[in-house]
Image (cartoon, grey):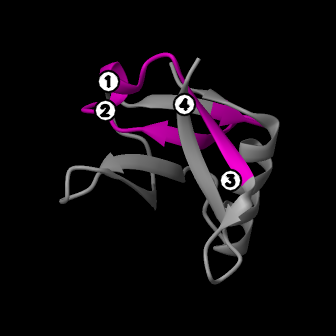
Amino acid sequence: MVTVTEKAVNELKDMLQTQGTPEDRGVKLVEAPSGGLAMTIAPPVEGDEVVRHEDRPLLIVDRVLAARLDGTVLDVKAEESDASGSARFVLTSA
């Protein structure tokens, strides 16, 4: 299971609210075509790992990635933002 820090919870909630995301969707970690990780907004599907907040999906880990990311921590590094000022999410070992 991926653990989500309080900073990351707040950033994910802001992302979902800014996008006007329906209650049944969350931020989903998926494998990018380049082999890295990407984030998208989507509903969970059977086999996905779902981290819920306030009874709605907040972070969804694609079922293909769930075992590989087990035991990691999703955090936000405030000092690491891109040119648009968006937060940078980082995954680290627990």
Tag nearer the camera, 4 or 1: 4
Assess disc 3: are there few (<14), some (14-19) or many (≥20) residues with their C-alpha within 10 Å of its C-alpha: many
Assess disc 1: are there few (<14), some (14-19) or many (≥20) residues with their C-alpha within 10 Å of its C-alpha: few
Sequence-first disc among 2 and 4? 2
Residue 31, x across and y down, in percent: 27, 48
Residue 35, x across and y down, in percent: 21, 50
Circles 4, 1 touching at the beta carbon (< 8 Å): no
Q: CA distance from mark 3 to mark 1?
A: 21 Å
Q: CA distance from mark 3 to mark 4?
A: 17 Å
Name the residue at the bottom extreme: 84
* In this picture, residue 46 sits left or right of residue 14: left
Mark 3 = which residue? 12
Q: Judging from the image, what secondary structure is the residue with disc 3 in?
A: helix
Assess disc 2: are there few (<14), some (14-19) or many (≥20) residues with their C-alpha within 10 Å of its C-alpha: some
Circles 2, 4 touching at the beta carbon (< 8 Å): no
Mark 2 = which residue? 65
* In this picture, residue 67 sits left or right of residue 75: left
Residue 5, x across and y down, in percent: 74, 33
Q: Judging from the image, what secondary structure is the residue with disc 4 in?
A: strand
Sequence-first disc among 2 and 3? 3
Mark linked to residue 92:
4
Does the magenta segment cover residue 22? no
Is residue 83 placed above or below 79 in the rendered structure?
Answer: below
Considering depth in this image, is 94 or 21 the residue closer to the camera?
94
Mark 1 = which residue? 68
Type of amino acid under label 4: Thr
Circles 2, 1 touching at the beta carbon (< 8 Å): yes
Q: Which residues are magenta?
A: 52-77
